[in-house]
Every structure is written in C-alpha cells, then in structure tokens.
Amino acid sequence: MRRYSLVILLAIAIFAALPYVLPTYYLSLTTKILIFVLFAMSLDLLIGYTGLASLGHAAFFGFGGYVVGLLVVRGQVSEWIALPAGVALATALGALFAVLALRARGSYFLMITLALAQVVWGIAFGWRTLTGGDDGLPGVKRPTFIVSLADENSFYYFVLLMVGLSALALVAIVRSPFGHALRGIRESETRMLALGFNVWRHQFAAFVISAAFAGLAGCLFVYNTRFVSPDVLHVVRSAEVLIMVILGGVGTLLGPAIGAAVIILLEDFVSSLTQRWLLILGIVYVVTTLFAPRGLVGLYRDYFSRNRKR
Amino acid sequence: MVISAATILGRSISRRVVASTLVCAAPLALVSSVSLAQQAPPLKIGVILPLSGNFTPAGEDALTGLRIYFDQINNEVAGRKIQLIVEDEQGRPDVALTKARKLVEGDKVQILTGFVSSAVALAVNDYAREKKIPMVVSADGGANELTTPGPLSNPYLVRTSQNGRTPSAAAAEFVFKQGWRKVAAITSDYAGGFDTIGGFAQAFCKLGGSITQEQYPPLTTNDYGPYVTNIKRDADAVVTFLPGANGLKFANQFIELGVKDKMPLMDIFGQIAYEPYLTQLGANGVGIYSVLHYTPMIKTPENERFVKEYVARAKRLPSDNGPDAWVGAKAIAEAAKAVGGKVEDTEKFLAAFKALKFDSPKGPIAFDKFGQVIHSMYIRKVEKVGNDYVNTPIQTFNNVDQFWPFSLEEFESYKYRYVDLKGSMTDCKKVLEKK
C-alpha cells in the first residue's frame, strides 16, 4: 500500500510540474490525452467490469459536449449551469439508452448501442438550425470557475483535477462491493441471479455511471477544442475509444488510460512523419492483438509474473 | 540586385556585413549577401489538408496545385527558403485543431493554409484568430460566414477559393437568361446543400424566376429513381447540387429514365460534370450544364501551362482545388515578396495579400476587403472534343465577388439565412423578405 501511495504522489508531482516543463503544444496534447483517458476509463467500467461491449459510447461523450456547446453558444448560459447540465443530460441519456439496450446481450447489445448512437449523430447532423449541422458550433468559450481557464495552463490544471477526481471515483466504484458484484455479473449472470443479485439493476447502474463519466469527458473535450461538430458523436469516435480500451487492457482502468495516451501520441507523431500513417497504426493494432491479447497492461503483468517465478 | 537583397534581408544583416558591403566591391557584396540569403530563417507554411478519409481526392488535388507553384519558384521567396509542413486532418475538425496547434506552437509556422471541409476551417478559425496567424483558405472550405461580417469573421483569414453562394448566383443568371423561369431543385440534405440552393433561390427570385419544387435526398441515397420520376414535368429545367458520388448516381438514373432528353440540367459546382465522371457518363453526359470557378478547358497560357504540369504529376485533369491552392501558394509568395520576406509582420503581410492582383489558371485574381478572392465564374457545357468528354466554358462572369450580384448592403438586408429557407425555397416572397 505504501508503494502505491508513493507512486500516486510521484504521478501527482509529475503532472503538476508538466506546464513548467512542456512546450505549449505538448501541454495541449496532454490535456487532450487526459480527456480521452477519462473517456476510455468510463467505457472500461462497462466493458471490462460489467462485460457489456458498447459500440455507441460516443453518444454520451458527444451529447454532453453538444449540451455544453448549445448552452454556451446559443443560450449564453453560465458555465456553472452548462457543465453540470452537460453531465446531467448525458447521464439521463445513458439511463434512457440503458433501458432500451439492456434487453439484449453480446453482439445484439453492440448493435443496439451502435444504432442508438447513430440516432443521436443523425439528429446533430440534421437539425441544422439548432446544431449547425455538419459545420458544427464554433465559438464555445473556455469556462471561468472562480479563475479564468482561458489559457492552456489553467485549463490543463482544471482538466487534471476533473480527470483525477473522476479516476479516484472510478477506482472506488470498482473496488466497492458494487464493483465486485459487477465483475461477478461479467463472469456469470445466471450465477449472480441465483445468488439473489438484481443483475439488471446492477447493469443499469453501471451503464448510467459510465455514461455520466463519458459525458463529463465530452464536456471537457468541447471546452478544450472550443468547438463542437457531429464528429464527436460519430461511430468512428466510438470505435476509437473501444480500441483504446482494448489496446491498453480490458478490465484494468489503468490499461485504457495507457491505451488512450499511446493511441493519441502515435496518431500525432506518426501522422506528422508520413502520409502512410494509417498503415503503421494498423500494423501496431495487429501486432498488439497477436502478441498482447490482454493489452499493454496484460503484457506487462505477464512479463513480471514470469520473471518473479524465475 | 544587391540593394534589393540587402533591403529584403533587413534587420538580419549584421553591422559588420553592412560595413563590408559599403567598403567592398560589388561582386564580393553580392556573394556575401547571397550566402546570407541562405541563412535567413525559412518561411514555414503549415498545410492542413485531408489526406485520408472521404475528402482525400480534394486534399490531394490541393496539395498538388500548391506544390506546382512552390516548385516553380524553387521553394524560395524573398531570400527565404519555403518549408512546407503537411499535416493530414482526416476530415475531422478536432484533429485539424490539434494539428494547427502542433504547427503553430510546435513547428512555429508563420502561415496556415489548405482547408477542404468547412467544419475544419471553422474549427481552426477561432484558434488562428486568437493566435493572430494568417490563415489562407485555399481549397474547398467554402463557409460563407468566414469572410462576411459577423461573429465568425476573422481579420487574419484570407480565401483564394470560392465561397458557397457565388457559383449558385452565376447559375441563376445563366438559367434565367436561357428563358427558363420555373426550375425543379434537387440537393443533398445537408448544410452545403441548403447554402447552395438557398443562394440560387435568392438570386433567381430577384431576377424574377422561381423554384417550383425542392427535393432533399439524404447524402447516403443510392437509388435516385424516385427523385427523378418525382420531378415535376412543367419545370423548365432541373438544378442540382449533389456532392461526391451522389452526382454520378443521380445522373445515371436521370439519363436512364429519359428525363435528360426532355429537360436541361444545371449542375451547380460541377459535381456531376466532374472530370473523372465524364468518361463514365460518355456520350450520355453531353449537354449537361454546370457552373464552377474553373474548368481545365480555359484557353489562357497560365492555365495551359498549369494543366500540362498537373497532368504530368497527377495523371489526371485538375479539379478546382488544384488551381485554388495554386493561387493560394502564389498569393503567399507574392505577398511575402511585397513585404520583403517579413511575413512575421502579420498586419502588413495580410494588407499586401489583399492588395494583390494577378493572372492565374482560373482567370484574373483580386481580393476584397474581407480577404475573399474576386475571380471568374464559368458556365460550362459537356462536349465531345476528339475522343474526350470535356467541360467547355460557354459563358464567363468576370470579377465575381462574394456578394455578387448584390452589394454587401443588399446582401445583408435579407432577413433569412439560406439554412432557414429549407422547405420554403419555392416561396419567393419569403426568400426575398427583408429585415
């Protein structure tokens, strides 16, 4: 336990020092990574801990973002209302989708979540007078929570705080009896039913919590880009975050965080080096699936446990 | 030569070199200033284009056009090497914004250029305005709002490509002149469609014509049969804006069902009469009218040279993105020359940019005070020349500015934005309602 707290303190110190070390571009890239870390972790609660693979998680991410964007740009609403409203409405959408999607399992669940997310995307794309259609909504101002977050440094600290607190909350959730029950459901729904657990209610709660954190990530994302377009709701976005989770390691929370960082950095560096960057990313995915089927964190753990045995 | 090189170098010349230039003989000074010229910091230009995803062909066209010009001047202007840093934005606004940040804050570029998708241009617009980085939109990114007064207007933005509404206005002029007073409009159900047909409706109603029917097939439509058979037969002509593969799908059924023989077709932005499609349409495509600010068939020395070079590089005829990016590249270079290479003085650089006038493959070029290009619009007709099917220009509107044929005041006096007109384009009274 002491080793863990040391690592956590060190991590806090490093993240707090980043604005003084990194050039501004890399700081803004770190902000983007942190936001996707939260998004990927929220999805992992659903996939890794509850065993529900969703291909529509961008719906909550994008919906939260659109609520913030619409309230700020069209409504001129204060950020004290806009940000909580974004998270709250994304959560509500999560509850609605959970009721619809939790009737199915496996690939059918995947298809229903995909279809529901496409509906949200379609609305954002088509309702041009409200959402600006595919041109999106430019001009979302950075918020002021006591201090102005307009500059990169203070916004970075704000995102760091939000993502840090959310990560702590997620860790607490998966370690709680509720989290253990979720893992039980992932392994065997029927056994948990036999033990007297209300499986549906647990899955519903996990779905809604996951949507809430995804919504928060979406709100932060829109504040970061100061712009929202249907791209935040697109199925590619859902697939991207799914890949982050799988690449990092399903069911570990740390894994998706690492996966998010690796993918964003890879995309950034490789796409600047060559026009054939998609090919290189593809090769990385194939190699990871072949040699690290349990993700990067799984690879690391395998390696260490093997060394320990020696 | 020596003097101009010295003035261009400006502050970068050290006192010692100035002294030696004054003392030494001219040839020696020439040598020293040339070697200094190579030492001047490079002019870094960040190019943001889609090189993967849906918009790839447009992105590649623009990149080819841009490179043709910069290679022509040996990638050097006013004593500074031109360094292009090309970034793929994948057609996604947030990726484009990340790339813009990388280019401006990481690579320290002095100018951003490119921009095919309007959403991408709008996403980067705010950032460029905040960082006061000149943003040269030199590909399709045609959002009207970028260069009209309003919350999105950006004093650091200039555009060398068309804005959304002008080709529509030119189409309206041509259609009305042909005596076609009632038209059926078909456009894809998305932002660009409403802007394009809205622009047409406004200009056409003003002239005295009217749209009698509007149809909005989704962008993902595969079967255009129902839309074609639904066209009202009492219309004098059909006006379309169907981007990408939609144009070809529509045209095939428009021809197959025999409507093309009965009604003329005006294709705004040349999406059906797109050069790669012309070979596929073959003899059936002959007679289709289209409007765009370019056609490879323009008979000027500038364009013939450009087309030759473009075909040599890309093995196909250029679309409008090639010449637009060529104009962007030339304008950057000419404006840099006008300020003696000091593009870092953003205000002066942009003022010099907006004052430029030159001939280009797409015709004579100038800019208005908002930084939007003033260029020509071409009405084109598909014809067979030799064994090839080409877009022959049959009428040219010169000096078309972004508000043409209106003045800025008249343009701004209309109450409805184009997007609000969806569903009521047939009602000229509403289309022309003033504030």
Image (tube, coloured by chain):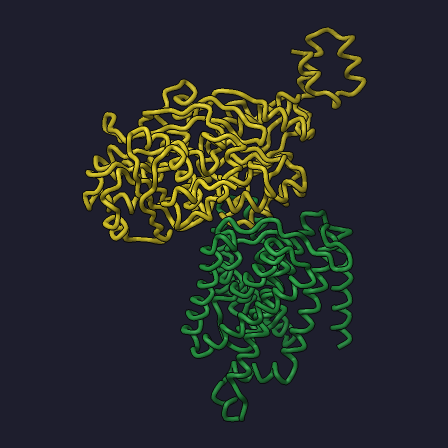
Chain colours: A green, B yellow
Residue at 48% over, 66% down: A56
Q: Can residue A298 be seen in this view?
A: no
Residue at 26% x, 29% y is B383
Residue B79 drawn above or below residue A156: above
In the rendering, at what x and y percent does residue A309 appear? 63, 77
Using residue B219 as the reference point, say whether residue B92 is left or right of it. Answer: right
In the displayed structure, B238 sits above or below A45; it is above
Q: Is residue B381 visible?
A: yes
- Of the 4 image quadrants, the one containing the N terminus of chain B is top right
Total marks shown come to 0
Above or below — where is A88 with respect to B71?
A: below
The image quarter in which residue A78 lies: bottom right
Q: Residue at x 74, y 59 (%)?
A: A145
Residue farthest to the top?
A: B25
Q: Position of residue B54 (x, y in %)?
A: 43, 48
Residue B183 lies, in percent from the top left, at 30, 40
Would you place residue A254 above or below residue A309 in this image?
above
Closer-to-camera residue (B155/B54): B155
Please provide percent x and percent y for residue A6.
78, 70
Q: Kindly identify the residue that appears in the image at 80 percent across and 17 percent down.
A: B16
Foreground residue among A47 and A72:
A72
Q: Nearer the viewer, residue B369 or B223?
A: B369
